[in-house]
Image (tube, rainbow, N blue to C red):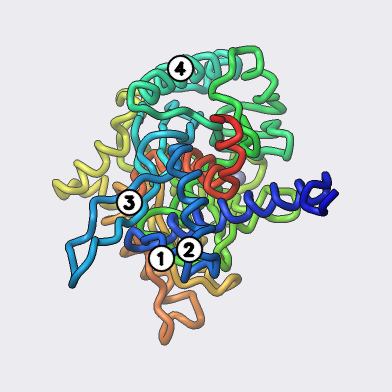
Amino acid sequence: MSPTHSPAGAARQGSLRELNLALVLGRIAAAERPPSRADLATATGLTRATVSAVVEDLLAGQLVSEAEPAPRVGAGRPARGLVLADQGPAGLGLEVNVDYLAVCVVDLAGQVRHHTVHRADLRPVAPADALTHLVELAGQARADAARQGLTLAGAALAVPGLVDDAGLVRLAPNLGWQDVPVPELLGAHPPLTDQVPGVPPLVVDNEANLAALGELHGRPPGPASFLHISGEVGIGAGIVLDGALFRGVRGWSGEIGHLPVDPQGRPCRCGGRGCLEQYAGQEAIVAAAGLARAELPADTATARLAELAEAGDPDALRALRDAGTALGVAVAGVVNLLDLDTVVLGGGYAPLAPWLCPPVLTEIAGRVLTAAWSPVTVRPSTLGPEAAAVGAAGSVVRHIVGRPAGWLTRSA
Ligand SMILES: [Zn+2]
């Protein structure tokens, strides 16, 4: 028996094929222009014949497609470049936040193909009921995806709280959730997606982490190191260092909303005093601007603030300036500690960035030791207000791109 026919040889061949699939697909995903098969052979060091065989597998599995031919240069047939497919596998992104549910579908190329936001105050709603509603929205997303030729290959759920490795939400103080077994509750419903080897059927993570990952892997991609701050009713941060999310020892890093900005200040839900959230959380800003949140539909609080600020309303402008100052004090502390040069304002902060950025920059200028010769950029997220759901769906897509053999096995 020749070595290649032994079980070990077959396993080696199998894993070599899997590695080549991931290598070639990764190159196509990362390329700025659609690469030809020849480009891929050069970039990967694989032979032309191997690249061609791998590309055939990826085409057959709906992971890539051929781009429109490039304009002809010189003699000969123009080489056709390869792009990630706009049909085939896709990721399902879900978010439960204090005042909305969001569901989105992102294809391999990172395009958002379905997006639903349901606005409602979820604090009085039992976790199981909120998740049941989310499952209904996910079912509509799955049907819409199928109509577009997409198959949901896995799901990720963003929550505004501390999540352990098993997906148990230990604490989401603003939602009032404590020890909520999300995977178990969702497990009582039919599966949200198809089962694909190598793709976790459901990942539960902190919304600020998923939003930061969405920014990191967005188009254009974020910088290698930055702080992403999600400003909702609570305030969470995702810390990205050298191209990876810094999760902390137990995965609970980023609770910037509970950094004290006034040690003797207002009491906070966490038990502390003077936390950032009490000055720059969405409800704090709305109250400071003289808007009673109860009088506003949940979705309009941020939009209404922006509208008033745009019109020069002094109360709204003062509320945003004070919130920006508090945020700047906290951010300056983080920048001093971690030596970051980019801060991204996401979630509900994104539309308020024109008014929040100037006071944040003022505090950074006055408090960060290196600010004089090493400026810090503060900018809004490119992903829009529901960045966490988009980031969640994107995290599923990266599983597929990182291990395409699982999808090919499934579709075979
Ligand atoms: Zn607190």
> Residues at badges 1 and 2 in contact (C-beta under 8 Å)?
yes
Q: Nearer the viewer, mark 4 or mark 1?
A: 1
Q: Nearer the viewer, mark 3 or mark 1?
A: 1
The amino acid marked with disc number 3 is: Leu
Image coords of residue 285 (percent x, y): 38, 43
User: Between disc 4 and disc 3, whose residue precedes?
Assistant: 4
Residue topped by disc 1: 38
The Cα–Cα distance between marks 3 and 1, rounded to whole angstroms, is 54 Å
| Secondary element at image label 1 | helix
The amino acid marked with disc number 1 is: Ala
Residue topped by disc 4: 139
The answer as to whether callout 1 falls within 8 Å of ligand 1 is no
Within 10 Å of the Cα at label 1, are there few (<14), some (14-19), or many (20+) other Cα atoms? some
The amino acid marked with disc number 4 is: Gly
| Position above or below: 195 against 271 | above
User: Between disc 4 and disc 1, whose residue precedes?
Assistant: 1
Image coords of residue 127 (percent x, y): 59, 19
Residue topped by disc 2: 48
| Secondary element at image label 4 | helix
Give the quadrant of residue 410: top right
The amino acid marked with disc number 2 is: Arg
